[in-house]
Image: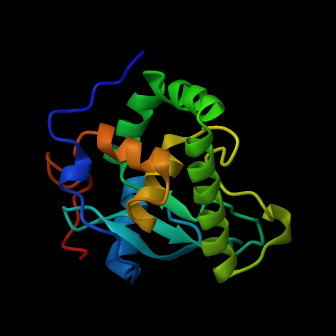
Amino acid sequence: MTVVPPQEPAAASVPPPKREPATDADLAAVAAQLGRPPRGTRAVAHRCPCGLPDVVETTPRLADGTPFPTLFYLTCPRATAACSRLESAGLMREMADRLATDPELAARYRAAHEDYLTRREAIAEVPEIDGVSAGGMPGRVKCLHVHLGHALGAGPGVNPFGDETLELVEPWWTAGRCVDMPDAG
């Protein structure tokens, strides 16, 4: 099943990444987006065009000592829903098939895996998750949410499947903010 890109993909309007400290207003927005207090938030890795965080950078070890491999956490419920729709349409299966037959794509995906590990290890080394990135990298495609978060947080050209996901999702901010918050950015 081929996924048809929307008329205006999100990639056409999404701003570049800009890592910023998470303010109290950002943490409140993320809590509203997630429906629970965020865990291990280090920074805002990307802001939605609406001004709210849509990706946060998390600590590799949570406050309770739990290892947490997801460095770039997609928080916007609309962006998350857009990824889920693509997953339901079979996009991950198509990506996995291409990964198995395209050595250049596999090399770019392995580089995305290494980028993820390098960024996380620059924050802290956590032996329990050494060599484990996220989203199935580098051998399979497991979670488009992770790949979109990586693409938004690291910028274009880093994660090929994140970039593809960004090209295929509809702009999630066009209906306004995903949660009703005062200005957070």
Q: Position of residue 38 (x, y in %)?
A: 51, 65
Left or right, residue 71 beside residue 5: right
Above/below status of 158 relative to 143: below
Of residue 63 and residue 154, the one placed in the foreground of this image is 154
Q: Residue at x 58, y 65 (%)?
A: 71
- Hey, which residue is sitting farthest right in the picture? 127
Of residue 72 and residue 25, the one placed in the foreground of this image is 72
Of residue 114 and residue 119, the one placed in the foreground of this image is 114
Q: Position of residue 18 (x, y in %)?
A: 34, 76
Residue 119 position by quadrant: bottom right
Q: Is residue 141 visible?
A: yes
Name the colour scheme: rainbow
Q: Is residue 35 visible?
A: no
Q: Residue at x 42, y 59 (%)?
A: 157
Q: Position of residue 96 (x, y in %)?
A: 59, 31
Left or right, residue 103 beside residue 33: right
Residue 15 position by quadrant: bottom left
Above/below status of 88 relative to 66: above
Q: Residue at x 78, y 72 (%)?
A: 65
Q: Position of residue 115 (x, y in %)?
A: 60, 66
Q: Residue at x 35, y 70 (%)?
A: 17
- Hey, which residue is sitting farthest top in the picture? 1
Tally of numbered discs: 0
Residue 16 position by quadrant: bottom left
Image quarter hosting the N terminus: top left
Image quarter hosting the C terminus: bottom left
Above/below status of 48 relative to 2: below
Left or right, residue 69 beside residue 43: right
